[in-house]
Amino acid sequence: MNIITTRVTSCVRPLLLTRSVSISCRRRKDEFQDLIHPEGREPSIPYYVERDGEDADLKRARLTYQSRKRGMLENGLLLSTFAKKYLNTFNDTQLRLYDHLINLPSNDWDIFHWATGVKPTPPEFDNEVMDLLKKHTQNEDRQARVTQPDL
């Protein structure tokens, strides 16, 4: 009885996938003119328009969201914990003042610096809500504020 054994050798080769990419995509300088902002000519931020006819519950929900979704983490933490603590107790006037405080300044660093006392608060934002925010920022009861509160 003759047994014939054959050895099968497989050769594994890497599969190279290539894609043809054109590198001749050039644009003229004037096509990017809307992206280039010469010094002193930065794009303007649209002026905040107050929402009329918004009931208090809807305004609280919007302000809670806006307090959490800031342009910088520091304000997101500071304002979201402030909103969690005070927003449900605010009357219509205080809600309007808080709405102006977080939506009218064009620079989030201004809000942070006013709340921490690094810069003086401008008269148009120096009110009872800003006083509460400054007191909240001092964190006298030493709460850990490293995450935003649950919704």
Image (cartoon, rainbow, N blue to C red):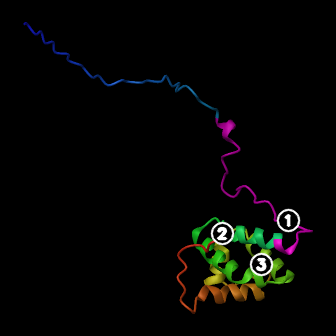
Instruction: Write down the residue under mark 2.
Output: 68
- Circle 2 SS class: helix
> Marks 1 and 2, Cα distance to the nearest angstrom?
20 Å
Q: Residue at x 20, y 16 (%)?
A: 8
Judge whether residue 147 is colored magenta. no
| Image quadrant occupied by the N terminus | top left
The image position of residue 104, as x and y in percent, is 77, 71
- Lower position in the chain sequence, tag 1 or tag 2: 1
The image position of residue 95, as x and y in percent, is 81, 79
Give the total number of marks visible in the rendering.
3
- Circle 3 SS class: helix
> Marks 1 and 3, Cα distance to the nearest angstrom?
14 Å
The image position of residue 90, as x and y in percent, is 79, 83
Judge whether residue 40 is colored magenta. yes
Instruction: Write down the residue under mark 3.
Output: 98
Residue with the most extreme bottom position:
140
Look at the picture and state if 120 lies above or below 42.
below
Residue with the most extreme front position:
1
Magenta residues? 29-57
Question: Which mark is drawn over residue 49?
Answer: 1
Q: What amino acid is labelled 1 in the image? A: Val
**Contact (CB < 8 A) between labels 1 and 3?**
no
- In this rendering, the label closer to the viewer, 3 or 2: 2
Q: Residue at x 55, y 79 (%)?
A: 145
